[in-house]
Amino acid sequence: MSTRQLKLGAFMRPVSIHTGAWRYPGALKDANFNFPALRRYAQRLEEAKFDAFFMADHLAVLNMPVEALKRSHTVTSFEPFTLLSALAGATQRLGLVATASTTFEHPFHLARRFASLDHISGGRAGWNIVTTSNPDAALNFGLDEHVAHADRYARAREFYDVVTGLWDSFADDAFIRDAESGIYFDPEKMHVLGHKGPSFSVRGPLHIARPVQGWPVIVQAGASEAGRQLAAETAEVVFAAAGTLADGQRFYADVKGRLAAAGRERDHLKILPGAFVVVGETVDEARAIRARLDSLVHADSAIASLSIALGHDVSHLDPEGFLPDIPETEASKSSRERVLALAEREKLTIRQLAQRLGGYAGLAFVGTAQTIADEMQEWLESEGSDGFNMMFPYLPGGLDAFVDRVVPELQRRGIFRKEYEGETLRDNLGLPRPANRFFA
Amino acid sequence: MSTRQLKLGAFMRPVSIHTGAWRYPGALKDANFNFPALRRYAQRLEEAKFDAFFMADHLAVLNMPVEALKRSHTVTSFEPFTLLSALAGATQRLGLVATASTTFEHPFHLARRFASLDHISGGRAGWNIVTTSNPDAALNFGLDEHVAHADRYARAREFYDVVTGLWDSFADDAFIRDAESGIYFDPEKMHVLGHKGPSFSVRGPLHIARPVQGWPVIVQAGASEAGRQLAAETAEVVFAAAGTLADGQRFYADVKGRLAAAGRERDHLKILPGAFVVVGETVDEARAIRARLDSLVHADSAIASLSIALGHDVSHLDPEGFLPDIPETEASKSSRERVLALAEREKLTIRQLAQRLGGYAGLAFVGTAQTIADEMQEWLESEGSDGFNMMFPYLPGGLDAFVDRVVPELQRRGIFRKEYEGETLRDNLGLPRPANRFFA
């Protein structure tokens, strides 16, 4: 019997990650405006013993042609800190992971908000560090040119140092609160950071006690060389984007292999690929659900995007036919190959292929509770991952199906918890509480 | 019988505004770390039909000598957006007013967080606009020199224009969500702000629907000439700092008098002075509670501060004696006069005077439910204010005393509501929903 267990996050947008989801029968299409719906989703995830509710984010209306934009529910969403704080009051054990950008935020504000969320939630906060590559976000913050990739990573690393330094402003036992003597805290146990670096000058201290978890859990998604190295040095959860088990195993081996050199233990970083999941009573039913969902993506916009991905205009071809041979061009080679392989593997028509890419085309488990549990178990046991960030095809139905059918099967196999291990997100993920760098 | 009614906010820090509060018998001294305690306070305020929970804020450990700092519970607090969002989930009608700085925040982030809080709370958000004068805050944001007063106000005005413009990004009926046609929203009803000004360049649109209230309620506290004019043009609630009824009446007449020129109705701006309140079974008991609370302020630190306020060193004098004649110096004339008048009026020793100033020395109602209601009614009926932002001397006892004893007396007199008028903060304050500047 396996002793390792899956760690499960839910990667959430209010309506779903899938762009056609709001049109699916029974889907809650107003969820972007409906906090009570999100509270119910969070409470269901907690019943199922998920590790965390992981809030996706972006800092602009997504950059797409108006014909696609007007059909997209992603145009509006809640802001992560306000949403997750409100969910903190409605849950007891579920982790709350906010996406926050090192390019467009200031470290003093971010350190404070995460510390506050961690105190309010009793130690359940996590920070998904992103550097934000959407050029439209820059235009909302007065930057005409988007910050270059290397600059963003250098800034991200300094940002992380400042934030974690601010979290360590007070020793855990700094606050005496002795009413008799009138001493509220011991100033010897307060550290003034005094950071001066290329991107930031931040004096400190942070005016909030050290977070319950020491630091909120550090999450990253970067897959580039710089992103992997930053993850190996700093991340505790990596939100990976593996397309296949073989890809996942390579990524897992690479990132885990970097930990020793960074002076870290192998188990102190959890690799959780994003995984889209569609549950049916039969495999065919699950496939039919997915096909129906994909069919709700606007075909013309999707075919325009497919042409861009292929570097070749396919809009004049019969969308109900299959792709002909497509000549190689200057378009991204890996994206083109991935698309052609997908079309070949699943025998998709041009329209189906375009709608798949426009909906969700990454790693997906589509089948019955049994076949999905088989796949998840294989990833776990063959070092493809330590668990997953689940993405539900539509809400609430897709979430309910996973919680009601797949989770019990994972529990029956002993590869997912039946009860939370502890009170904090770190407890449940099996991560150590970081030492305070300024106080023993 | 009066037809006007008081509007009541609660101006809160987790422990209390008063610096000695955490030492008071029965006070909850760990409230800075204790979200469940704050949830109880908010729920009690809602039972009492308060308009709003008003969260104080600052962006640095408060600038004071270490001997005073180590005795101050203000060294740590929750961050307003995370706290108020968590409280949104635990209340149904209470307004939630967050203090946020136009000097150290970015308008895109702030517009988004307030819109999100307004959606999550069902239309209960308010923004207390501050320009932040604490020079230590600047050091946490990489500014060596604090921004000059005039620059801060010019920036604040532009900031306000950007934020309100972003809130108007979508018409109220922009979101069609027609599953059949696949149209999620009408792009004709989305406005791209395209702001380019001296302080900010912000393209927009904001990627969240227009707030439930149109705009969250706009609150300001500035008392300077620039602050009053900004309030007359933009504020819907003014958090005033009147020391006496005569001061209050002058301020009220001045600010209300500016509204017509700004094209606004007199009732569409509510003036709510901060008022510290101490309730006793008798007036003497209330005074004794206050004296005991003041006695918990550290005398040496308080006397050092008194010397600064007077522009004259009084630390060598007998603290149990009264102030001698103090020569006029270069120190702030109005502050010196206010201090001397207070000492004279209440016959305070040097120690008592210093501790009063170190605790809380502004407008205070100290007495029985009857005498306090009398004073509040006089302010209301003589155009000293439209209500108050109440400050409780210690928690939970001081809040409970006001809610249990004074509120019923105000209700009995018909000058405070027994039920909320509506669902949103605007409904309860009697403020109109702002028109969308881009869509009829």
Image (cartoon, coloured by chain):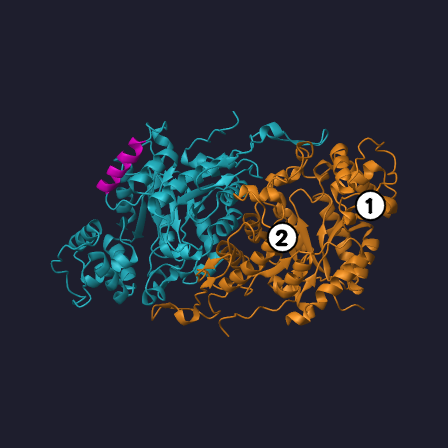
Chain colours: A orange, B cyan
Mark 1 belongs to which amino acid? Ala
Q: Residues within 10 Å of mark 2 (few under 14, many from 20)?
A: few
- The picture places residue A191, in percent across and down from the top left corner, at 44, 67
Front label number (1 vs 2): 2
Q: Secondary structure at mark 1?
A: helix
Q: Which chain's residue wears label 1?
A: A
Mark 2 belongs to which amino acid? His
- The picture places residue A95, in percent across and down from the top left corner, at 62, 57
- If you read the primary sequence from the N terminus, does the residue marked by circle 1 or circle 2 appear first? 2
User: Which residue reaches farthest front?
Assistant: A330
Q: Read off the magenta span.
A: B245-258
Residue receiving disc 2: A149
Mark count: 2
Residue receiving disc 1: A286
Kindly tell me whether residue A422 is visible in this rendering: no
Q: Which chain's residue wears label 2?
A: A
